[in-house]
Image (cartoon, rainbow, N blue to C red):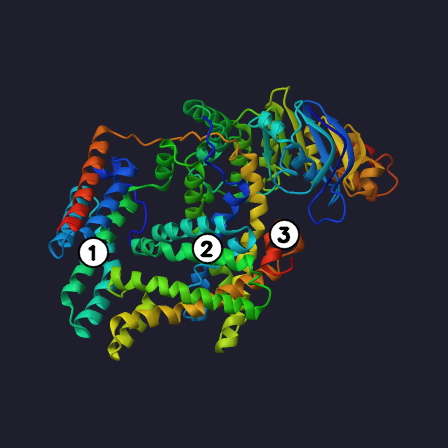
Amino acid sequence: MITFESLSFRYPSADRDAIDGLSFEAAPGVTLLVGPEGAGTSTVLLVAAGLAPAETGGQASGQVRVLDHDPTTNAGRRELAGRIGYLQPSPWTQLSGMTFSAVDEVSFAAANLGWERQRILDAAQRALTSVDAKHLADRHPSSLSGGELQRVMLAAALATDPEVLLLDNPTSELDSVGTRRFLDVLASLPDSVTVLIASTDVDRAADAADRVILMDGGTVVAQGDASILASEDAFARDCLTTPALIGARSGALHPFPLTLTELVERVPSR
Amino acid sequence: MQNNRTSLTPRLLALIPLAVGINLAMGKIVAALAIPVFLDTVGTVLVAALVGTWPALITGLVSQVTFTVVDARIMWLFFLPVQLFVALYAGVAAQRAAFRSSVRAVAWGLGLGLVAATLAWPIALYVFGGVTAGGVTVVTTVLTGLGVPLGWSVFFASMSADLVDKAITFLLVLAVLRSLPLRMAARFPRAASALGRQ
Amino acid sequence: MILGYESGSGFLYRAHPFTVLTLVLATLVTVFALPALVGPLGVLVGIVLLAFIGGVSKVLPTASVLAAPFWFFLVVIHVILGDAPTRALVVGLQVSSMIVAFLIFLVVTHPGRLVDAMLARRLPAGAAYLLASALQTVPRLRARAAAIRDAQLVRGLRVQGVGGRVQGLLALGMPLVLGALHEVDERSLALASRGVQTGLHPTPLHPPSDSSLDRLARLLLYVFIVAAVAVRFLT
């Protein structure tokens, strides 16, 4: 469970708030954050992960609770250590650079938490298997392709069995097969896990999302189910699904069709 | 299982290896330009200017060890005191706004070259009989051939290399500090004082 | 040329990384502490024999290549131009011994194993991580430097005259340095989110075994070191 209440956050030296009086609640399940460039979706993840302002610098005000702890405080971050999995959009800079094989990279967080050795090795094997990357275990991380690396990093985020997963554009390096597998992984997570995804790939993420939050200018514009991705609000912010966009462009299909099936059904047949 | 010795922040754990990488990668660039310098302390001086003396000292230490391992030349390890001194000196230089102008930067760089060479030559002379890295040794050999006593040959050779090297190092760091994007500069508050803007 | 770890077998591979490191330390100290000429010569013979017995004689050709320029300049400076052939011989033997010992260490020690050994010995995690990370960052940035160099040269960068060279240096050096600094933010976020600063000591994933033979070998090497230093100061 993640709760934001009138939260504002400003990066150092920035002249406006990246998050501006944001309030929303993300229950267990998959919540999708979408918005145009600069909407603040990535920053929401950083705040929830306890990285902003602690690591980024800057100023936060308002309330944020993750699993009933405040990630903006030291005490809160201590309580949350290992219970949050966070994934950056670029898997290359996410690499620790401190390990010499994919399986050790997946084990990195658990090792840092001081877990017992056998427990770490088991968890890493499980996580690699769950993302279908067991065969990559002994490869050197720098020898992996972008897609392989993104899967390995997802395994790394999953390895500590987190109760909260914060994923920033997690499919940026994946092809369509990889993305489908990724969605399967999300679907196989226990129901108790809260997943927050910031994504520009609205088409595919829409399928997996239980809830969608549309953001702009650091605050919530609309929230609800996936049909938001076929709304006028989303249209104004370039966040429509492709079928909705086709519907919108072809004119007068109101409300826009959310899925391909809907689009086909509503296109007048000759 | 508490361990309080790990006082390095994630930011320093990210920055220092990159600074070490800069120290060791500059050689690839100077080789293309046929400039008789190493620029193997650019990262160390940069860390001193961006975050301070302690991180610079760690950068110097890790650099020299990494240099030794990557090039498989254990001889480099003997010059560790020079790297550490460079870090200390650069820390002081940054505090004294050495990067306020190019003239100032070159002057501080020449000063460092003078001291670094003074520190390096006894190591080169007494440990290695005056034989060290390629270019410097050639100068030593030529000077010795001209009848200059060995001690002075090694000294002049080190000096000629280090003066130019450290002056260019400081100029390059100055150029980097000046072109830091505002957002990045805000994350390295010390950069402003190194540039003399505070 | 063998400049780093190569898989293999033999007791030097099975030895704890700190044992081999102590061997390097012992070589470093004793070549200078033991009386010349016999001391450095004995150490070199010993370390070369060890390379053969330990099945890592493959380091010897590389060691020769690394030592050759030293010998060349030592002979030119001290024998042809000077008149200190003994000094040339002593320094040459000292440097050669160190080169062989260090190459043995590099060839048998996988960096990951060294890092795990450091963590298992509860040395500061920051030290182990910085070493591991620096070792992997260097080839990456060297490759990038080469790419920047090639790109700028293709685009017609002039490298003539002193001014041109300094200009060229800025054109090549700045992108490398600024690019590296650009990574710092994202990398530090990644490390922080992965628990590098929880105040806990990381678990070594594959701690190397430290046998009683290892401990005995290290003890003997320490005794050798202390004895050599004692010889130096007492005679």
Q: Which residue is tagged 1? A: C94
Tag in front: 2 or 1: 2
Q: Which chain hosts label 3?
A: B
Q: Tell me how far mark 2 sits from mark 1, CA to CA.
A: 31 Å
Circles 2 and 1: CB distance less than 8 Å?
no
What residue is shown at x 77% (from left), y 46% (from top)? A16
Q: Tell me how far mark 2 sits from mark 3, CA to CA.
A: 24 Å
On screen, residue B106 versus residue C60, left or right, reads right
Q: Which chain hosts label 1?
A: C
The quadrant in which residue A47 appears is top right
Circles 1 and 3: CB distance less than 8 Å?
no
Asked whether residue A42 is in view, the answer is yes
What residue is shown at x 59% (from left), y 67% (from top)? B101
Asked whether residue A263 is in view, the answer is no
Q: Which residue is tagged 3? A: B184
What residue is shown at x 45% (from left), y 50% (from top)? B57
Q: In this view of the protein, which residue sits in the foreground, A82 or A143?
A: A82
Q: In this view of the protein, which residue sits in the foreground, C231 or B58?
A: C231
At mark 1, the secondary structure is helix
Percent coordinates x, y for residue A148 in the rendering? 51, 39
Q: Is residue C40 above or below residue A196?
A: below
On screen, residue A77 versus residue A232, left or right, reads left
Quarter of the image with the C terminus of chain A in it? top right
What amino acid does circle 2 point to? Leu
Q: Which chain hosts label 2?
A: B
- The residue positioned farthest toward the bottom in the image shown: B146
Q: Which residue is tagged 2? A: B88
Badge 3: how crowded within 10 Å, few (<14), some, or many (20+)? some
What amino acid does circle 1 point to? Gln
Q: Are marks 1 and 3 on the same chain?
A: no
On screen, residue C186 versus residue B33, left or right, reads right
